Image (tube, grey):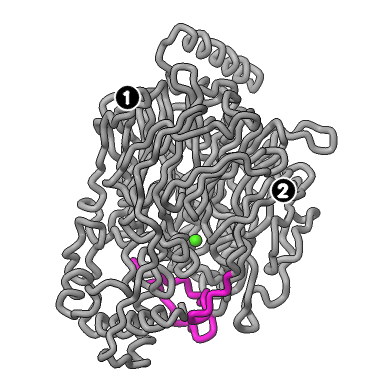
Amino acid sequence: MRLSTMTLLCAGALLASVARAEGAPTVVDAAALADESNGANWLAFGRTWSEQRYSPLQEINAGNVKDLGLAWSLDLPEHRSLLATPLVVDGVMYFTGSWSRIEAVDLRTRRKLWTYDPKVLEVAGDRARVFWDSNRGAAFWKGRLFVGTGDGRLIAVDASTGKEVWSAQTTDPKLPLFINGAPKVFRDKVLIGNGGTEVGAARGYVTAYDTETGKQAWRFHVVPGNPSDGFENKAMEMAAKTWTGQWWKHGGGGQTWHGMTYDAEFNRVYIGTGNGSPWNRRIRSPDGGDNLFLCSIVALDADTGEYQWHYQTVPGETWDYNSNMDIVLADLEIEGKPVKALMHAPKNGFFYVIDRTSGKLLSADKLGKITWASHVDMKTGRPVERPGARYEDGEELIYPSAFGLHNWHAMSYNKDTGLTYFPTMELPGWFSDDGIDAATWTHTDFQLDTAVRFTKGDEVPVKMDASSLLAWDPVKGTKVWEVKLPGLWNPGTLTSAGNLVFQGRTDGRFVAYDAANGKALWEFETGLGISAPPVTYEVDGRQFVSLLVGWGGAGTSFGGVVTAQHGWAYREHPRRLLTFALGERAALPPSPPPRIPTPLVKEDFKVDPMLVDQGENLYVRNCTFCHGGSAVSGGYAPDLRASPVPLYLDGFHEVVVEGSRAAQGMPGFRELTREDLVALQHYLRRQATLGANAKL
Ligand code: CA
């Protein structure tokens, strides 16, 4: 059975290459998505189904990359944060941007063909507060594009016209669930999950829809619901044995907001699942338990969604160490034997290699400083936790932080060097649940509350040299080279047969490295912090590299002071699509220089410390997502310390409570009272003074 599928795939690839030679349009189907050898297009989020982000193209290579230059650029003023991996099919690029919009760009005329706007802000209204404007990409299958929207829809769009074909609501619109991840397609089905673990009592799931009709094909829940309602399947019954207390009242979590990979060889999907809701296991599952299938790779039958196997990276998770990161498939040779491997570097700091035939763990190696666990016991496959790491004895400083040692930023794998390439962040976080009453704690929907404190006042224990680009050998379990990177939240990578690794940086530089040794061979100043991974492809037989430049994503806001250091002031620096080729020397239109916002100090405003505390609590729950940790904007949304709006209560009320700027993406927070706004005013003025005195 397996052999015949493989034969069919190979025959399909052969037919596809014949079709290409005759100039026939590419049909993006199973054969095309399994074909690693065709570098002309970039057909899927991870280029092909393996998600290796490895291009076989070598016109641009380590020997000549010094001659790479800007071929053209396209300004994108209607977008703010650009995180997406663009897709390229036969000379047309498709990418998602702010508010889940899709843009189609003709790579020959270098002009937009169409824009699809799902009108997310109109549909979501005040619910926009939980997702802001991020989107990481679309999927392509047989002439259609698929995009998940911030408000929880999955939409099919005709790739030639940009017209909507169908739309399916994948979430309950009353719940604080959102989509910012890329759907994945396989065998006439399209799979999507959602986010929302931190902003309500949420139960994670993924859903597959028919690509033709938009009808639901299957749904798999990540965590069990209330046993008295009956279990959806045997897997949920098994999972329920690993939970205690009344977990369903808290939702349980496990949102699958990013990593999902289709495996054509086994006709499976692997989903990387989220952390618990709330983070704190003492509240979520008070008598302990592993809490399946949180923080796991779960293998599901692609046709039915039936459970096949799982590997849990963090049993009984309690630090936001989700396993939502990329899942990359490759044939490796381990101890002289060929292995159908799955590679995964989740937040918790370990790099996992799993035999995907069976789900057996082959290795789990530390990528950097980790203090929550000493190692993974290879006999049991379980991490060996360090006493105190569950902050059971009070406040603990733990590596990694809730940002994760690696987050969603793309990992690439180069079969020629045998290395994986991805950015890391080696920094600790404070964890404590002192003062949080397990008996009375409840979720407040649409507000950030994790039942754990994960910062310590304004002390953000962040080293400025915490970030790296890592070249990691998945077979030896060792670091081969490392390049120090600025700030936090550096984006993902692309690798190629030209012995190259490309990566943007938070300081706005776009760099090409020698894939074997990490030597920087080329760089380009883009004029704005980069948050998206690059892609490469051919147009009329010539190789190009493209990159979206548009600072954004949760890390840029939560990072506060650390991400603010670059001076990417909100809306000041042009958002762009940049395209590079050998021998080109186009000039980038000028961008304003970096600018650090100046906090407004109001000398006559008498700050009341009690109100500051109340205001801080409100700020963390409602405003941090976009406006930044400690009220320091990382450039993702306006810096409220520098804004005159909070100075005047009536105007502040109009914007914050009534939502007068909803069309610009600032939803109404209608439950906030006049007293709440006053408390926020006190907190913001205190933070402004600290900032003006360079104490933030
Ligand atoms: Ca999380």
Circle 1 Cα neighbour tier, 10 Å, few/some/many (<14 / 14–19 / ≥20): few
Task: Classify 478 as above or below 602.
Answer: above
- In the image, taking residue 567 as reference, residue 487 lies left or right, namely right
- The picture quadrant where one finds residue 169 is top left
Mark 1: C-beta under 8 Å from nearest atom of ligand 1: no
Give the residue drawn at x 33%, y 80%: 684
Q: Nearer the viewer, residue 236 or 669?
A: 669
Task: Classify 114 as above or below 125.
Answer: above
Task: Classify 691 as above or below 110.
Answer: below
Q: Position of residue 53 (x, y in %)?
A: 56, 35
Q: Nearer the viewer, residue 172 or 401?
A: 401
Main secondary structure along the magenta-highlighted residues: loop
Mark 2 or mark 1, which is nearer the start of the sequence?
1
Magenta stretch: includes residue 274: no
Q: Secondary structure at mark 1?
A: loop
Task: Classify 294 as above or below 3.
Answer: below
- Which residue is the site of mark 2? 481
- Which residue is the site of mark 1? 109
Instruction: Give, as a three-letter code, the residue at label 1.
Output: Thr
| Segment tinted magenta in the rendering | 433-462
Q: Nearer the viewer, residue 63 or 360?
A: 63
Instruction: Give, as a three-letter code, the residue at label 2.
Output: Trp
Q: Secondary structure at mark 2?
A: strand
Q: Position of residue 67 (x, y in %)?
A: 55, 31
- In the image, taking residue 327 as reference, residue 74 lies left or right, namely left
Between marks 1 and 2, how big is the CA–CA gap? 40 Å
Give the residue drawn at x 31%, y 85%: 682
Q: What is the residue that sits farthest to the right in this orientation?
A: 336
